[in-house]
Image (cartoon, grey):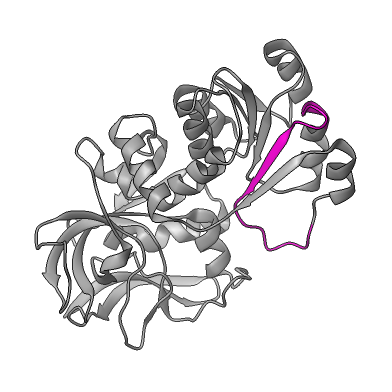
Amino acid sequence: MKTPAVVFTDVAQNEVREIEMPPPGPGEVQIRTSYSTISAGTEGWALRQLFTWARTPYPCVPGYQRVGIITELGPDVEGWQVGDRVMATVGRWEGEVVSFWGSHAAVANTVASELYWVPDGADEVDASGTVVAQVGYNAASRVAMEPGDWGLVYGDGLIGQCAAQAAQARGANVILVGHRPERLELARQYSAELAVNNATESVAEVVREHAGGQVAFVIDTVQQEAAQQEYSPLLEHGKGQIVYSGFTPAETWASMADLQKRELTTHYVSGWTRAKMDATLALMAEGQMRLLPLATHQVDAVARGAEMYRMILEKGEPFLGIVLDWTKA
């Protein structure tokens, strides 16, 4: 069968076009996608051939998070039925256009081990961004904290916002630091107690006023040397914790000497696990992690999918969450 999909055709080139989708193979299911969420950072790097963890195999279908309904079972699939509502990560098939994670398609096959139940109460749009939300959850889960502790989250993108929400769910008071006014306003409403524009405000003064001058932890999703220099003095010597989350194609930037002198504990997180994905979906069902309010763009996937990537590359207008709607495809 043929199905519409987002296709990266070359460096900085993409389109929505029909691709061939075979029946599901052994251990796979076929899913009719309702919504998929773009991971603007990772997918933007991949579109520009800057994702250094894996080379982009043009032409390919990007994306690693979607929600939909199982429409067909391949051989040897157990525990799933046609009609189940699921969150899926990677897609899998063979053809001229390959899967580079492969979730931005109206219909695609997924190995059953990469399916997750969408619990009652979880919004489909929220669940369509579970992988990105889980990156934030993973970062917040690494911190040793007590309820009422103050922490900083650097980065006003989806990962930063989700990390702030997950830290709040653990009882932390969160100050989110960024530089995009429209994203900071969303953070104040949905993700953090306070949001600071460090291009115009002093983070140290805000920490002094609200947290007594020091914070228990920093979740760093921007990974820039200037950020480290700004937040390191705000962590208690010998007790402060930093979680580095996200991806950067740049060379190593953090000062190990600074971390050692201050005896700071550091964590590095990437990828996803079933336990953390399920925990993230549970928080969504409880209303403690929300992506829908952060979705500045929810668009028809076929009509405007390619346009969303041009917007990401050109930064033509402010955006945060970008959700592709496949329900009319």
* Quadrant that contains the N terminus: bottom left
Residue 108 appears in view:
yes
* Quadrant that contains the C terminus: bottom left
Query: Which quadrant holds residue 101?
Result: bottom left
Q: Is residue 64 above or below residue 97?
A: above
Residue 202 appears in view:
no
- The residue located at (53%, 50%) in the rendering is 316
Given residues 134 and 103, the one toward you in this image is 134
Q: Which x, y percent locates residue 166? A: 48, 34
**Helix, strand or loop: magenta stretch:** loop
The number of numbered badges drawn on the structure is 0
Q: Which x, y percent locates residue 225? A: 80, 47
Query: Which quadrant holds residue 3?
Result: bottom left
Magenta span contains residue 1: no
Extreme residue in the left direction = 82
Answer with left or right where residue 23 lies relative to residue 19.
left
Q: Which x, y percent locates residue 70? A: 15, 62
- The residue located at (36%, 70%) in the rendering is 102
Given residues 202 and 130, the one toward you in this image is 130
Q: Is residue 190 above or below residue 69?
A: above
- The residue located at (83%, 43%) in the rendering is 259
Given residues 25 and 17, the one toward you in this image is 25
Residue range (magenta): 233-252
Extreme residue in the bottom direction = 96
Answer with left or right where residue 81 lies relative to residue 168.
left
